[in-house]
Amino acid sequence: MPDLSRSQLVVYAAVAVALLLVGARAIRAEGGGTTALPSAATASGEDEAGFGGGGEGPYAGGITLGDGGGTDLVVDVAGAVRRPGVYRLPEGARVVDAIGRAGGPAGNALLAGINRAARLTDGQQVVVPEAGPGGAPLGGAGATAEAGPIGLGTATVEQLETIDGIGPVTAAKIVEYRDQQGGLASVDQLDEVSGIGPATMESLRARLQP
């Protein structure tokens, strides 16, 4: 075998180093990949935010989970429903849709005690009352349902009286003031009505929407 020159040895050494580097990279590429496992919530049938799955039966109503965008609503459904819990619904959904997402009303639900057509607001709690003996709400007259916000422009005296701190006199003043102004653009305008203090304003903001 003829003696190799120094330049040939350098070339052969460079080729060997290059081959070693290529092989090492190939080994790391094959061993470095991982497979993501489904989260516990996904495996259990819940959505990624931890909210319950879809409703069943006639109250399912075609309402589906939102895409997690900023227009979704998150509501707490409690009381006489099959699956009480926290659910995400699209903006514009109504109380009946929230009941559907919770599996529909339970057998002892008193649906006459809740306004199922009311629009939902983010963070709202929907409580479906339970029927007691004789069909009365379980727990007495106080077992009412959160039926969603009341429209500021259409609220009647009777509806305003259901708000904490609002009696018949104040309710009538609110309706009169609204009519005098030709309508109201904001709940904060009710601060001008005599007899309404800071605590009452907080109650009005919680229940009224423009």
Image: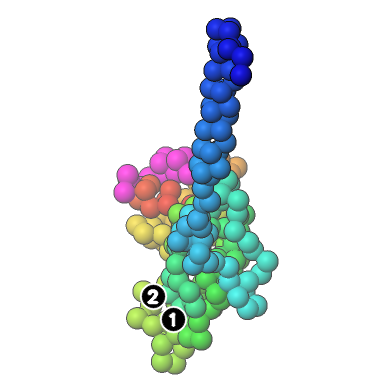
Where residue 124 sits in the image (x, y, percent)? 46, 58
Q: Give residue 51's mark.
A: none
Q: Amino acid at mark 1?
A: Glu
Q: Amino acid at mark 2?
A: Ala
| Residue visible at 46% across and 78% down in the picture | 80
Q: Relative to 110, is 164 above or below? A: above
Mark 2 surroundings: few (<14), some (14-19) or many (≥20) residues within 10 A:
some
Residue pointed to by mark 2: 143
Relative placement, left or right, of 194 versus 179 is: left
Residue 83: in sight, yes or no? yes
Where residue 65 sits in the image (x, y, percent)? 59, 59
| Residue visible at 61% across and 14% down in the picture | 2
Where residue 30 sits in the image (x, y, percent)? 56, 42
Q: Give, as a single range, the part of the protein colored magenta.
A: 186-199
Instruction: Evaluate if marks 2 and 1 touch, with contact meaning CB atoms under 8 Å apart.
Output: yes
Instruction: Give the SS element for disc 2.
Output: loop
Q: How is the image coloured?
A: rainbow
| Residue visible at 55% across and 74% down in the picture | 103
| Residue visible at 58% across and 27% down in the picture | 19
Where residue 210 sits in the image (x, y, percent)? 55, 46
Residue pointed to by mark 1: 130
* First along the sequence among labels 2 and 1: 1
Furthest residue in direction front, as rendered: 1
119 or 56, which lies in front? 56
Residue 15 highlighted magenta (yes or no): no
Instruction: Give the SS element for disc 1.
Output: loop
